[in-house]
Amino acid sequence: MLEVVQLEKDYGDLRVLNGVNFRVREGELVSIIGPSGSGKSSMLRCCNLLEQPTAGQIIFDGLDITREDVNINAVRQNMGMVFQQFNLYPHLSVLKNVTLALRYVKKMSTHEANELAMRALEQVGLKHKADARPNQLSGGQQQRVGIARAVALKPQIILFDEPTSALDPELVNSVLAVMRELRGLNMTMLVVTHEMGFARDASDRVLFMDGGVVAADGKPEAIFSATDNERLRSFLSRFHTENTPL
Ligand SMILES: Nc1ncnc2c1ncn2[C@@H]1O[C@H](COP(=O)(O)OP(=O)(O)OP(=O)(O)O)[C@@H](O)[C@H]1O
Ligand SMILES: [Mg+2]
């Protein structure tokens, strides 16, 4: 589904990605963990060319999307993105936030867009909030609207960049629960997260990014019991994963 090959990214003189390699298969949930500044967000943003890679390839559904002749806007319609800050339009209702791209990017009729949006809102448990404004919702609910907005487009993959980091602790689980449900529906997901309990329990695979490369890539059982990678062990020791609620 998605294959990242020898990805490099420089910001001026600063090299932040130094040959990143990994792949995400259809239906997989892959979590990305790693210290602050290790390049997780840069890598994710390169995947849909929100950042221009300096070198390397991003192969999405068989197509190298870094090629100049690729219509990136068409590609992005198949790649949902959920950000730490929810990026909802405050002056629009929840329903309009979800239908916006359906109507103006996918050119659907209002009726068709509303129907898809209501289904997506139902999926995240917020059908009853369709007419509310974002500021009338909790942070967790706003993020679930962000997820509904991505889901409604029926993308082939959704990229999440720390979707729960801006939330109060008691709201985190409602968002993670929605993501677990999506996984149950076989949605392909690439998730940067600091929620080690989620990475351990909900992922098919976990990537550990460190110093601009994928320093470990494996099943959660292997990553969370890794004893041979000193940097990974040191990173994980900062989290009390055994105490994280499931
Ligand atoms: N637009 C930019 N211009 C210059 N430097 C940048 C830019 N974006 C990120 N960086 C730098 O690139 C490095 C990697 O940043 P990135 O945001 O990808 O890390 P991260 O792993 O997502 O960190 P965090 O866990 O704190 O979100 C950092 O040193 C950061 O300062
Ligand atoms: Mg980041």
Image (cartoon, rainbow, N blue to C red):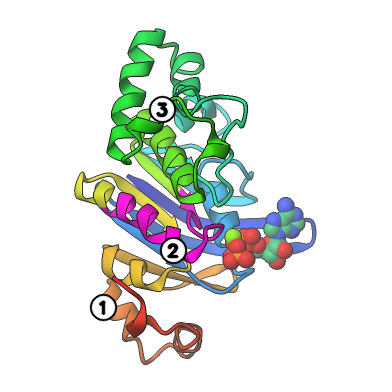
The amino acid sitting under disc 3 is Ala
Q: Which of the two marks, 2 or 1, is nearer to us in this view?
A: 2
- The total of numbered circles placed on residues is 3
Disc 3 marks which residue? 130
Residue contact at pointers 2 and 3, CB within 8 angstroms? no
Disc 1 marks which residue? 221
Magenta segment includes 177? yes
Secondary structure under tag 1 reads: helix
Q: Residue at x 35, y 59 (%)?
A: 30
Cα distance in 3D space between marks 2 and 1: 26 Å
Answer above or below: position of 59 versus 122. below
Q: In front here: 61 or 147?
A: 147
Secondary structure under tag 2 reads: helix
Expressed as whole percent of the image width and height from the top left, the position of residue 48 reads 52, 41
Disc 2 marks which residue? 170
Question: Within the displayed image, which quadrant is ligand 1 positioned in?
Answer: bottom right
Q: Residue at x 55, y 55 (%)?
A: 43
Magenta segment includes 198? no
Cα distance in 3D space between marks 1 and 3: 40 Å
Cα distance in 3D space between marks 2 and 3: 23 Å
